[in-house]
Amino acid sequence: GLKGTGGTIDIGTFIVFKNNGTGLLVDAKGPPATTFALNSSGGSVDTTSGTAIDLDPLTVGMTIGSVIATGGASGIIFDGVAGTFTVTGATNISGMADAGISAINTNAGTFNFNTVTVNNVLSTGGGIGWASGTLNVTGLA
């Protein structure tokens, strides 16, 4: 994960596979708090027993091909995120303790998802918990 990181990173196309932990973690709230921007042009995040993506707070210009999260707290967490976050392919989330996709506190960004499947039937989690930011979903499966 990226904690206390400042500046801008363009990671291009990336692939993350993670078991028992967060796949992509960015924590710029500190201490000390930093100003950080993260950009990507493609890739995927696949986690088991952990959150796939946890962004808190930063500016993004991210495009990702797919996100898979099985088990854990939440599949995707946005907290204080600005910019544009896009998943062009499928987002599949299952078995979460909390919401499959969660936008908490103050988000100023635009969040675009193609097909989204959240299956938390066998857990205590919900579907999509949205406090702020613009959410666009092409299809719910």
Image (spheres, rainbow, N blue to C red):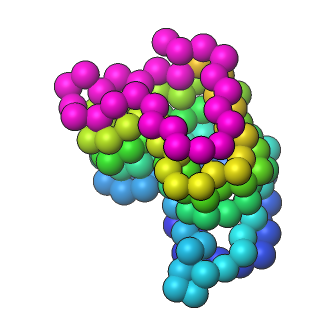
Percent position of residue 137, x then y: 63, 22
- Range of magenta residues: 116-141
What residue appears at the point 52 percent right and 85 percent down from the top-left corner?
31
Q: Nearer the viewer, residue 25 or 77?
A: 77
The single residue placed furthest to the bottom in the displayed view is 32
Q: Is residue 30 left or right of residue 110?
A: left
Percent position of residue 141, x then y: 49, 12
What residue appears at the point 40 percent right and 28 percent down from the top-left corner?
127
Residue 64 can be seen in this image: no
Q: Is residue 27 left or right of residue 41?
A: left
Q: Nearer the viewer, residue 122 or 14?
A: 122
What residue appears at the point 56 percent right and 62 percent down from the top-left corner?
56
Magenta stretch contains residue 5 = no
Q: Is residue 55 left or right of residue 37?
A: left
Give the image quarter of residue 81: bottom right
Percent position of residue 102, x then y: 47, 42
Q: Is residue 17 left or right of residue 14?
A: left
Magenta stretch contains residue 139 = yes
Query: Does residue 48 sit above or below 1 in this rendering?
Result: above
Percent position of residue 97, x then y: 27, 41
